């Protein structure tokens, strides 16, 4: 890392936005991929995507591609999608079912455990057991699959132990993904993530969201929390919060945030009319009119309503190109057309993400100006400051 980048990291004021170079420099973007994305736990998918032996899907970001699969022992594993021969991508399909993974270049073949089981015309001294696929660290937290590429991943297990009782009533492992959508945005990935980490912009920018979510106004939200807690306990939820992010996290890359906050009166969930969208999750006995903000690791964000879950990730595809990938999850036994209507389920976060695409794109256009200077963050943008703390700390580590 050059001295210029080191100085930019040291000189950053955590009360302000980042300087222009962090959103425009090719050198910093490459460092982002290597030191931040390569060292953090990343939400790859859900166990419902691979219910059977041989099922697999790919998780791609930046220059990387990871195979997530279920083997004959019913174990979910992750491997780098790079052949150990000359580096070709092995899986070209985004998902499917295979008994073996065969490289399309020279036909080197691997089993579901990543072992090399065939390589033709090699020397007698060649030892196939030295050329297994590179294994990738994987954690399955209540059905949510996270992967980490570094050999020494952040120790997030103790944090997940604290989180588990709070999320257990939702039975996340029993959900299924019923829809996913990708929204390309012409902006650096950090601008997309920063936008999600604050609700300072919600009231002026998200008309539909602001009808139901009290998060847009902290004063209104706090007044509604006591009655929400009563309803949440009656529904079968534990009352508790976790705020271990940025400087307060136990270690870099182990961030965790959980808080249930109230929707406005008349909203059981976030449908256009406030009425239920799908069957209640897990063991919930009733709608409490709340939403849980959940962050696991530094880059993975979820919203848990009483009847569905939204998962968000902001995938870098280039210096100033990002995919906002959104997933909608409901109970695994819910039937489309009978228990939920897909257009109704996806309505709010589809229109909200379209808003965000426009906001983030315009943000990048402004930041590209040679005359842009970092401005001060508001009290409602604490999540942005906490992200900057962890991001810059990890970026500075060799």
Image (spheres, rainbow, N blue to C red):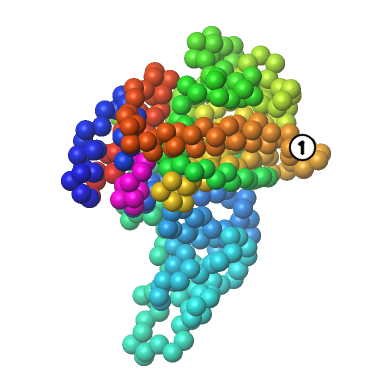
Residue 297 vs residue 339: left or right? left
> Which residue appears farthest toward the left when viewing the image?
3
Pinpoint residue 125: horizontal percent, then vertical percent: 33, 87
When the figure is inspected, residue 118 is found, relative to residue 275, above or below; the finding is: below
Residue located 47% across and 21% down the image: 200
Q: Is residue 61 magenta?
A: no
Q: Which residues are magenta?
A: 22-31
Residue located 63% across and 16% down the image: 264
Pinpoint residue 348: horizontal percent, then vertical percent: 65, 31
Question: In this view of the protein, which residue sits in the foreground, 191 or 104?
Answer: 191
Q: Which residue is mark 1?
A: 341
Pinpoint residue 62: horizontal percent, then vertical percent: 43, 54
Residue located 49% across and 14% down the image: 218
Residue 84 vs residue 168: left or right? left
Number of marks = 1
When the figure is inspected, residue 221 is found, relative to residue 208, above or below; the finding is: above
Q: Secondary structure at mark 1?
A: loop
Judged by its main secondary structure, the magenta piece is helix
Residue located 43% across and 46% down the image: 320
């Amino acid at each position: 890392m050059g001295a210029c980048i080191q100085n930019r990291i040291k000189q950053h004021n955590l009360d302000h936005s980042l300087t222009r170079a962090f959103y425009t420099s090719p050198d910093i973007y490459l460092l982002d991929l290597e030191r931040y994305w390569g060292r953090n736990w990343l939400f790859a998918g859900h166990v419902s995507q691979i219910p059977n032996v041989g099922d697999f899907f790919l998780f791609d970001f930046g220059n990387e591609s990871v195979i997530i699969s279920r083997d004959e022992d019913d174990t979910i594993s992750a491997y780098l999608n790079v052949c150990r021969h000359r580096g070709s991508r092995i899986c070209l399909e985004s998902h499917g079912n295979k008994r073996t993974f065969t490289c399309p270049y020279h036909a080197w073949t691997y089993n579901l455990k990543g072992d090399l089981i065939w390589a033709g015309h090699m020397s007698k001294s060649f030892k196939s057991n030295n050329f297994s696929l590179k294994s990738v660290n994987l954690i399955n937290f209540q059905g949510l699959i996270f992967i980490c590429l570094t050999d020494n991943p952040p120790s997030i297990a103790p944090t997940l132990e604290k989180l588990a009782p709070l999320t257990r009533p939702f039975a996340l492992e029993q959900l299924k993904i019923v829809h996913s959508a990708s929204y390309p945005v012409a902006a650096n990935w950090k601008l997309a993530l920063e936008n999600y980490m604050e609700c300072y912009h919600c009231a002026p920018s998200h008309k539909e969201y602001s009808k139901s979510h009290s998060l847009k106004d902290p004063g209104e939200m706090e007044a509604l929390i006591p009655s929400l807690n009563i309803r949440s306990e009656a529904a079968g939820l534990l009352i508790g919060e976790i705020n271990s992010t940025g400087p307060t996290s136990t270690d870099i890359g182990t961030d965790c945030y959980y808080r249930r906050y109230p929707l406005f009166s008349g909203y059981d969930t976030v449908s256009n009319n406030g009425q239920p969208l799908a069957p209640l999750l897990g063991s919930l006995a009733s709608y409490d009119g709340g939403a849980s903000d959940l962050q696991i690791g530094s880059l993975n964000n979820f919203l848990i309503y009483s009847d569905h879950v939204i998962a968000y990730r902001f995938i870098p595809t280039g210096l100033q190109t990002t995919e906002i990938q959104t997933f909608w999850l409901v109970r695994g036994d819910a039937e489309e057309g009978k228990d939920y209507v897909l257009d109704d389920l996806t309505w709010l976060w589809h229109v909200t993400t379209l808003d965000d695409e426009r906001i983030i794109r315009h943000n990048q256009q402004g930041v590209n100006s040679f005359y842009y200077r970092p401005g001060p963050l508001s009290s409602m943008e604490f999540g942005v400051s906490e992200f900057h703390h962890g991001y810059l700390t990890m970026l500075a580590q060799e």
